Image: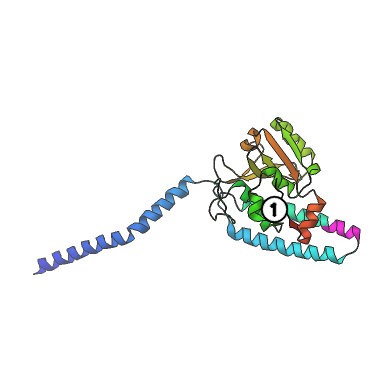
Amino acid sequence: MRKILIRATLILLLVGTCIAGWVYRARIVALVETTIVSSTTSGPAPDPETYSVLSESLEEHRRRLSADYRRTTSNTERTKILAQARTLLEMSLPRLMRCWLGTPWDFNGIAHEPGDGKVACGYFVSSVLQDAGFRVEWAPLAQQASQNILGTFLPPDDMKIRVGVDYERFLSEVLSCGNGIYIVGLDSHVAFLVITDGGEIHFIHSSGASPYCVVDESREDAQVLRRSNYRVTGNLTASSEVIRNWLLGARFKTRTL
């Protein structure tokens, strides 16, 4: 009788182990797959939480500066406020852009937040600007050719078009125009070009080339920018009219052909 009880107990233990194995099999497989992905994926991940906080904080500062601007009648004070607004944007916009790093690229991607699906180059530019407080027409702007995207903010005289210009010469010419947040249009691409006070260059874009996601590239690594034959640039934050319109919440009507 004792042997029979022992055998029954062992059988029950084996059955229980098998059942538990099948119950937790999916969890184990998922854990293994996550570990494999984590070990083979490098680079920053999208950060929607920080993005939301930065966007809300920037909007609060914009409204405060806007109220100060409307309240004063002194041109000197208004010039100072515009300068403060420019500094605020030049600090905040790159931070917003970098929250998108690692978000996958797709030609038809329309993600509106970091990591929320895939994003095309135009939608990346449009989303960042909208979430920085620019009252743009999100989808129509994103779907335009790069020169029209720039033309939505700047007049033709404030845009520089270069065709067939050597890469290093192009960079030298852009650096000579000063620091700021530029939009740059290429053969079939649009991106941000951030020029710091110290002359550093950051090419931040949703890349349709490897690694096929939003990236922040140095002048040496910006191969898409280097290879393009056509380049059109415009410095958004160097324009007092753009800064004023952003500050006062004016609408930016999308330029179309």
Q: Please tell me in which quadrant of the rendered image residue 66 appears.
A: bottom right
Residue beneath the point at 77% across and 65% down: 64
Q: Is residue 54 above or below residue 94?
A: below
User: Which of the image's four quarters has the C terminus?
Assistant: top right
Residue 221: in sight, yes or no? no
Give how far across and how far down residue 196 sits, in percent: 74, 45
Residue beneath the point at 17% across and 63% down: 11
Give how far across and how far down residue 73 sits, in percent: 90, 64
| Front residue (pair 123, 220) | 123
What residue span does the magenta drawing correspond to? 74-81
Q: Is residue 117 above or below residue 70?
A: above
Q: Is residue 80 above or below residue 6?
A: above
The dominant secondary structure in magenta is helix
Residue on which disc 1 sits = 93
Give how far across and how far down residue 85 sits, in percent: 78, 57
- In the drawing, does residue 193 fall left or right of residue 118? right
